[in-house]
């Protein structure tokens, strides 16, 4: 529904009120400037950009400065700030976000991380933002409703998932152009991390609108926090391919990476994946199996990779739920086992050169994998530093 400029709208209890750059007084409200209503899933919701609203108790004009943040309460005492004005009249505007915090939010796309299981794992800022936005774009509206209800948040939602992300993103860009504040959430954790969101963020940025990230829960980081790995680097791989051949190829390509590898896995594939990891990677890796993080049956087990399959098979419950698998980086000793010549060349060069240069030359001279030489070089340096203490 689009309301035309200067069209008078009678105020009634069930009449959504929408105000444009006009005056408000008496029994009618004038609509001015650009004024549009969007009835989506919540038919009684009316969007209204803060700087498009003029409210006056006794036909008084309220000075607005374009782009200036402002806050107002409607329905309580009628306080107005930011526009240097107090309203004494009791105005209740259905459909307007009644939270003063809401009106302090700048128009932008807010990328909000949500819990990965435990609903207590949401930040204060995320709650304030979700309370304050005009719309929440979410992977699954029913799932989001459960989350929003839990925090008593009444915000309209819009479905944005992998099958409609481009169209949904275009819709969001249209709303951002009208000055709306939009939150983007996924079913769990951080949007865009193995979840829809990246395309939307890219499109919104390309269209020139602000994207504001709100950090929070993420399964990979949660698992890493409890892994206790001393590896200096980690590589977030996410889900391995579902097809056996492609999965094995992917694992082979990761063999020489001198970093811990972080995988996401679903319960119905965890046995296959762990079996392939154990079969294709060295027996000297360790694995951290982190399942049901932050939930009732959370389990975090660290064990040698060759024992992982047996451990999972020992109890059917261990194969249930959501998984993060972390495979430790190849041990430095393994990298050193390249060959004796490589070790000698590397040690000699390290005595004279910085690590980067020594590794580069050692790679050229010995034709050994650069990652392995680099890992060994770091280990040698660390050992030398420890000796000198
Ligand atoms: N966006 C999410 C994040 O930031 O972590 C990831 C979403 S991805 C679709 C879902 C996968 O994340 C699951 O299959 C599992 O591998 C991992 N995951 C999510 N929640 C988890 C949890 N509570 N415990 C363990 N893994 C979890």
Image (cartoon, rainbow, N blue to C red):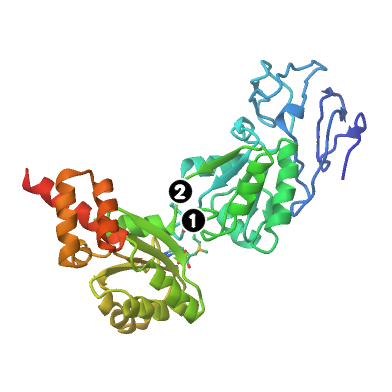
Picture quadrant where residue 376 is located: bottom left
Compared to 260, does 28 lie above or below?
A: above
Q: Residue at x 18, y 50 (%)?
A: 349
Screen quadrant of the C terminus = top left
Q: CA distance from mark 1 to mark 2?
A: 7 Å
State the residue in front, 45 or 176.
176
Picture quadrant where residue 46 is located: top right
- Residue picked out by circle 2: 216
Residue 62: x percent and y percent?
75, 17
Side of 111 relative to 88 (left or right): left
- Residue picked out by circle 1: 189
Compared to 131, does 141 lie above or below?
A: below
Q: Is mark 1 within 8 Å of ligand 1?
A: yes
- Crowding at label 2, few (<14), some or many (≥20) Cα neighbours within 10 Å? some
Residue 3: x percent and y percent?
89, 38
Specify the farthest residue to the front.
365
Identify the element where label 2 is drawn: loop
Side of 244 relative to 280 (left or right): right
Picture quadrant where residue 97 is located: top right
């Amino acid at each position: 529904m689009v309301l035309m400029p200067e069209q008078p709208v009678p105020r009634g209890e069930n009449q959504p009120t929408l105000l444009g750059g006009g005056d408000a007084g008496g029994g009618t409200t004038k609509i001015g400037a650009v004024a549009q209503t969007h009835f989506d899933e919540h038919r009684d919701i009316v969007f209204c950009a803060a700087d498009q609203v003029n409210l006056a108790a006794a036909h008084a004009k309220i000075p607005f400065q374009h782009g200036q943040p402002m806050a107002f309460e409607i329905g309580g005492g009628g306080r107005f700030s930011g526009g240097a004005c107090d309203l004494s009249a009791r105005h209740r505007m259905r459909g307007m976000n009644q939270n003063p915090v809401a009106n302090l939010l700048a128009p932008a796309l807010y990328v909000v991380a949500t819990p990965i299981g435990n609903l207590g794992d949401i930040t204060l800022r995320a709650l304030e933002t979700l309370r304050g936005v005009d719309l929440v774009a979410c992977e699954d509206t029913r799932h989001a409703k459960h989350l929003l209800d839990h925090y008593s948040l009444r915000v309209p939602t819009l479905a944005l998932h992998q099958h409609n992300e481009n169209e949904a993103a275009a819709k969001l860009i249209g709303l951002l152009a009208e000055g709306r504040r939009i939150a983007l959430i996924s079913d769990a954790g951080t949007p865009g991390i193995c979840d829809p969101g990246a395309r939307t963020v890219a499109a919104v940025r390309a269209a020139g609108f602000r994207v504001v990230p709100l950090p929070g829960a993420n399964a990979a980081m949660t698992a890493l926090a409890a892994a206790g790995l001393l590896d200096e680097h980690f590589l977030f791989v996410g889900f391995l391919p579902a097809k056996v051949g492609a999965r094995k190829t992917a694992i082979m390509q990761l063999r020489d990476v001198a970093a811990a590898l972080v995988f996401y896995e679903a319960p119905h594939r965890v046995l296959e994946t762990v079996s392939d990891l154990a079969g294709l990677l060295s027996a000297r890796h360790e694995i951290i199996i982190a399942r049901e993080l932050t939930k009732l049956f959370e389990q975090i087990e660290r064990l040698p990779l060759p024992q992982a399959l047996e451990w999972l098979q020992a109890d059917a419950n261990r194969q249930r739920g959501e998984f993060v698998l972390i495979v430790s980086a190849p041990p430095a000793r393994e990298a050193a086992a390249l060959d004796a010549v490589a070790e000698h060349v590397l040690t000699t060069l390290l005595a004279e050169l910085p690590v980067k240069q020594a590794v580069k030359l050692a790679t050229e001279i010995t034709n050994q994998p650069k990652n392995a030489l680099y890992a060994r070089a770091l280990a040698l340096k660390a050992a030398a530093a420890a000796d000198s203490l």
